[in-house]
Image: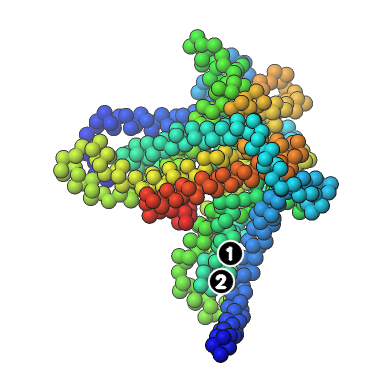
Amino acid sequence: METNISTLQSDTSIAKKKKSFKKKFNDSKYLLLLIAPCFVYYILFHYLPMWGILISFKDFSPFKGFFASPWVGLKHYRAFLTNPNSWRLIRNTFLLSLYSLLWGFPAPILFALVLNEVRNLRFKKVVQTVSYMPHFISTVVVVGMINMFLSPSTGIVNVFLESLGFEKVNFMLDPKYFRSIYVISGIWQSMGWNAIIYIAALSNIDQQLYEAAAIDGANKFKRIIHITIPCIAPTIIITFLLRTGSLLSVGFEKAFLMQTPATYSTSDVLSTYVYRQGLISGNFSYASAVGMFNSVVNLAFLILSNFLARQFSEISLW
Amino acid sequence: MYYEDKVTVFTVLKVIFLLLVVAVTLYPFIYMLSVSLSKNIYVMRNEVKLFPKGFNLKMYKIVFRDPRISIAYLNTILYTTVGTAISLSTTAAAAYALSKDDKLLFHGFFSVMIIITMFFGGGMIPTYLTVRKLGLYNTMWAVVLPSAISAWNLLVMKSFFINFPKEIEESGTIDGLNDLGVFWYLVLPLSKAVLASIGLFYAVGIWNSFFGPFIYLKDPDKYPLQVILRNIVLAGANIDLEAASAAGDDLVVEDSLKFATIIVSVVPIIAVYPFLQKYFVKGVMIGSIKG
């Protein structure tokens, strides 16, 4: 009896739902039309490739096609993880983003703090506008500039070094300079842009705090240490934790454009290796497996750092 | 801000620091511009440091006469125009639909579907194979479609539409407009500012994109500027020598030519980005805190 009643009840509720679904669909049909191109885009260019990760568990050959290629399980993952050269790739990727984080992270904070102390609004605006500019310059141009300025024959840096009596250095072909060049040019390109979030946080500080502190006799440095820094600390912590979430993701473009085979010992990272294995050598399955390994580690880092962000503050990604 | 009116060591230090930042940012561009505008002889003697010596526009004539560069320039303009139109229209439409979270059916599903892609993706190889499978290889569509919508821009725009005044939309509904009509006749005309800024972000992105065209295009006459630029500046492809000799000089300094090529490619960007400024903060704040 009881079951009968409950089925009866659920029947009516389903009918009710169906009716409301039809009405809801009718209500939102034009909105669905508006979101349709976006839906198609995400299916074609994000979810089909995610489905395509399955080739990393197969021996994919373009001639056989996706479905006819045989399954091989974890063969490619095992091949990558047991390859002694893989360690170098992981190490290079990790160190490149670690150094970028360690040096690149404090720079925008310092810049924002100094900029915040400027009282001439016009000067402030000009400095800020100029500081954004490199962010909009393409990677090709930035790497092109690096190459030309550091060129051993005509580059301005080497001409300068020579005029000081030093020997010329072939920076771009020496593995020991790769990381420094990568990190320094990264700071040059993104310091101003990354400072935006701190500048915004600084402008939200209650000015009465400064006035009260000044009346109490706190000098400028004391005001910065006791008011400014604590007020933007949450922003700093959250930005830092989120940056640690991408410790094993080095973008392809810059590393690829900067590297030469001579510097592979420091410049070869996971993304450039995936490119060479997949698109140059045609080992599609193996390269997909390496890419997948990288994505999964990234995701794990991100989840971990988001968890930490939650512990430290109210703000988190999800 | 509370200030004291006396000049301290701190004041001097901060001004020096900021001027240094400005100098380090601008000097590379000033240097490239000056070298490209100088007479070859001074360039070869490394005498150009800040201002051009022996001002002339010869390098720019050579650059514009090189058919590869002019074709690539036109390609970049074409890809940027078409790509921005596609990206902006699909993003705006989807953002408007997503901003109606009480009305849009499957709202949660769409949101999750979009947000997942911010954290996880197929990666380089599966995406490449998908683009090939879709028959886009070596066409313009491979350049503009795979990265058409940025989830970031979509969320910024959605949060803009959420704050759009409800009264205006309701007045449209009372006048008999459906959602499409409200979006087209009322919302879009009043959202020109956000459309312009997101559109410019997309345009800059496509103008600067290298990787997509690099792996998806085969024919050199389809290459955009960034790929040609990489071939000339980084991979050591020579500028068309016929064009160079046509400029009436057998002595061409490679560096000046490369610098001129770089300058030509960045001028449109440098001219445009200051107009984006007022939207930066809004976008960055929304993106970083609301996720």
Q: Residues within 10 Å of mark 2 (few under 14, many from 20)?
A: many
Is A312 placed left or right of A194 in the picture? left
Q: Residue furthest top?
A: A165
Q: In this rendering, which labeled residue sits more in front, label 1 or label 2?
A: 1
Can you say which quadrant of the picture contains the N terminus of chain B?
Answer: top left
Amino acid marked by disc 2? Leu
Tell me, for residue B110, which label it has, or none. Answer: 1
Q: Element at badge 1?
A: helix
The residue shown at (64%, 46%) is: A292
In this rendering, is residue B146 above or below A194? below
Q: Have a look at marks 1 and 2 and say if they share a chain.
A: yes
The x, y position of residue B187, in whole percent, is 53, 67
Residue A183 at x, y = what percent? Answer: 51, 31
Which three-letter amino acid code belongs to the residue tagged 1? Phe
Asked which secondary structure carries label 2, the reply is loop
Between A220 and A104, the one nearer to me in the picture = A104
| Label drawn at residue B104 | 2
Decide: is B100 above or below B72.
below
Asked if A261 appears above or below A195 in the picture, the reply is above
Can you tell which quarter of the image residue A274 is in? top right
Residue B190 is marked as none
Q: Quadrant of residue B15?
A: top left
Q: Are marks 1 and 2 in contact (CB under 8 Å)?
A: yes
Where is residue B78 drawn, in percent x and y? 69, 48
Instruction: Pick whichever, B262 or B66, lies toward us.
Output: B262
Front-most of residues B211 and B208:
B211
